[in-house]
Amino acid sequence: MVFVADSAKEKILEIREKQNFGDDYFIRVSVTSGGCSGLSYTMDFDNESQPSDQVFEDKGLKIVTDLKSFLYLFNSTLEFSGGLNGKGFYFNNPNASRTCGCGESFAV
């Protein structure tokens, strides 16, 4: 399962409304090679499902990821931190053995 914190839900709903994305749009998250720790997160709105998608729903939001990324994201929580020192969207990932200083990449 991939979870969504209340702070992330509020920001996602705000962005979806500003961008005029309908209810058929969901959040697609994935893990790609790169970043100073070896793996990076990506996140975007999408409305097209793929055959190998893993689909989760938390707090009324649909979260979709590919199977390979799910192995890295299992039991992670998508969070949001705003303000001057905020990180924006980030994952609280119990599978990460280390993260970089910026929090955008990790290793397992």
Image (cartoon, rainbow, N blue to C red):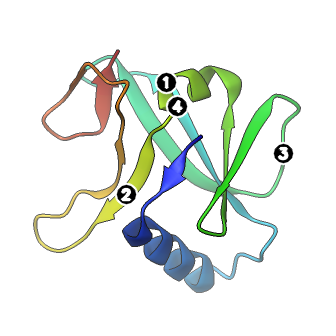
Q: Which residue is mark 3?
A: 49
Q: Which residue is mark 1?
A: 72
The secondary element bearing badge 2 is classed as strand
| Pointer 4 local density, CA inside 10 Å: few below 14, some 14–19, many at least 20 | some
- Which label lies toward us, 4 or 1? 4
Whole-percent x, y for residue 23 in the image: 78, 74
Quadrant (top left, top right, bottom left, bottom right) of the N terminus: top right
- Disc 4 to disc 1: CB gap under 8 Å: yes
Q: CA distance from mark 3 to mark 1?
A: 20 Å
Q: CA distance from mark 4 to mark 3?
A: 19 Å
Whole-percent x, y for residue 12 in the image: 52, 70
Q: Residue at x 23, y 40 (%)?
A: 103
Q: Which mark is residue 74?
A: 4
Pointer 2 or 3: first along the chain: 3
| Pointer 3 local density, CA inside 10 Å: few below 14, some 14–19, many at least 20 | some
The secondary element bearing badge 4 is classed as loop
Q: Is residue 29 left or right of residue 88?
A: right
Q: Which mark is residue 79?
A: 2
The secondary element bearing badge 3 is classed as loop
- Which label lies toward us, 3 or 1? 1
Q: CA distance from mark 2 to mark 3?
A: 23 Å
Callout 4 amino acid = Phe
Callout 1 amino acid = Tyr
Whole-percent x, y for residue 13 in the image: 55, 77
Residue 71 falls in which quadrant of the image?
A: top right
| Pointer 2 local density, CA inside 10 Å: few below 14, some 14–19, many at least 20 | some
- Which label lies toward us, 4 or 3? 4
